[in-house]
Amino acid sequence: MDADKIISFESLKSKVGRFNLREKTFLIPEMNRIGGYLLAAAFRSFGISAIVLETFKGLDLGKEHTSGKECYPCQITMGDILYFMQREKARLGSSFNAENYVYFMPESNGPCRFGMYNKYQRIVLDSFPGLGSLKIGSMSTGDGYSVTGLIEKEKVRSLRKAGFFSQVVADIMDRALWRIRPYERTSGMAAAFMDDAVKIMSAAFERYAEAVDLDAILKELEKVLAGARDVIDPALPAKPLIGIVGEIYLRSHVESNQHLIEVLEKYGAEVVNASITEWLNYTTYDRLREEKIALHLALKQFKFAEIKNRLKNIAGYGLELLYQQKQQDMAYRRARTVLDVAEDHKVAGMEKLLKEEGLFCFDVGTEACLSIPGIVEYSRHGYNGVVNVYPFTCMPSTLTSAVVRPIMNRLKIPYLDTPYDSSVQPGREAAIRTFMYQAQQHFRRHGRNGGGKQD
């Protein structure tokens, strides 16, 4: 066997995984801007040097070192890390050492190509002189994104709680931005407000995350949301409400979806995007499901040692999911006393909906498990249109489209697929304007109470 190939495969095992972050600079790719900054702040609270990578400036580098068969987020994140490392080498000169950094690229199980990003990026990084020692820190949906190994054992639980809560708060802040920007008193007022708000909440997480003082963080959030109300012009009438689902990176990363939410707002929409926390809850929920299935099989086979192990895992994932939902409910409850941000979906309710309607099955996996019931939930709660955002050729989102299009046609609720790659699709603007015209007509006929139910 070729020696170079042996070294390459060994690199995938030895330089991709969980690594202690002490004395390292932790590089977090920007997916959701607010979520990235709050997550980095939470890590800094624990004494870890964490920064969010500049994004989209290295896209040409990403495209140069991918074949085009990868989905779009792989190209973007590949470009982001190469761009950063090239700039660091230029800035530091002879003192540059790639071993001082850990690049964060999680993964998922199942058929989605996302599960192979960090492996492919490892191979590319190894091909660059001086970048072979850059480690890729990876967490997986397979264990619910455990942070074991990133920090001292006694701080693992606190870091996990703080990291999760950073995404809950980021979701609320995003929903606050989408709530106020369509009704802002002057153009740009909401964006400027949110820039300041991100700095305030980042400082709060740096100060309070290590102690997991969630109450102190929420008090800062309440102050921020109180200021958000001042951005709204109360004289402006309500607008059509549009829901977004789809692949988590594309719907969250504003550059890659070509500022879709702002374009929808330009044509008269108020928008609610699916949350980051929804995916985190789903990964925990799915591990719980898998353990219950495995327990059922172990009971049939009278494997008593395995039964004991499965019961232990069920208790662990069950308590974790309960904790996540409790903290999320608390945060939204307190936030909504200040500003009427949209509430989030419950994952168990989404699986129940799929079973009741016979639309899809959680056994299949992928984000289609969330997007399909998410669309139905939007339709039942009076939304005037739904947009499905995804990378060109994305299998889970193509499945979503195939399942929901007939449903939305029956309900007479406007629906739009928006696949993306690095190009600007001809007719994109016309498609969005047509969709928004239909949403405006739906809004005029039904307001926000025209929720559909299948026959």
Image: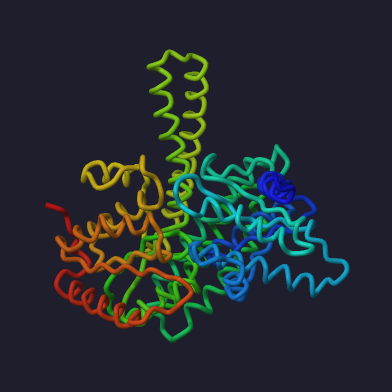
Residue at x 30%, y 54% (from the top left corner): 372
From the viewer's side, name the closer residue of 425 and 201.
425
Query: Could you tell me which residue is drawn at 47 percent across and 29 percent down?
Result: 314
Residue lying at the far right in this picture: please name it. Answer: 94
| Residue 402 on image: x %, y % | 27, 57
Q: Residue at x 43, y 65 (%)?
A: 391
Q: Decide: is 133 above or below 232.
A: above
Q: Is residue 150 visible?
A: no
Pinpoint residue 34: horizontal percent, then vertical percent. 54, 65
In this rendering, the answer to whether 170 lies above or below 426 is: above
Q: Is 108 rendered above or below residue 67?
A: above
Answer left or right for 153 relative to 431. right
Q: Is residue 307 left or right of residue 98?
A: left
The answer to which image quadrant residue 322 occupies is top left
Which of the 4 image quarters holds residue 28? bottom right
Question: Residue 114's x, y, as percent?
Answer: 51, 54
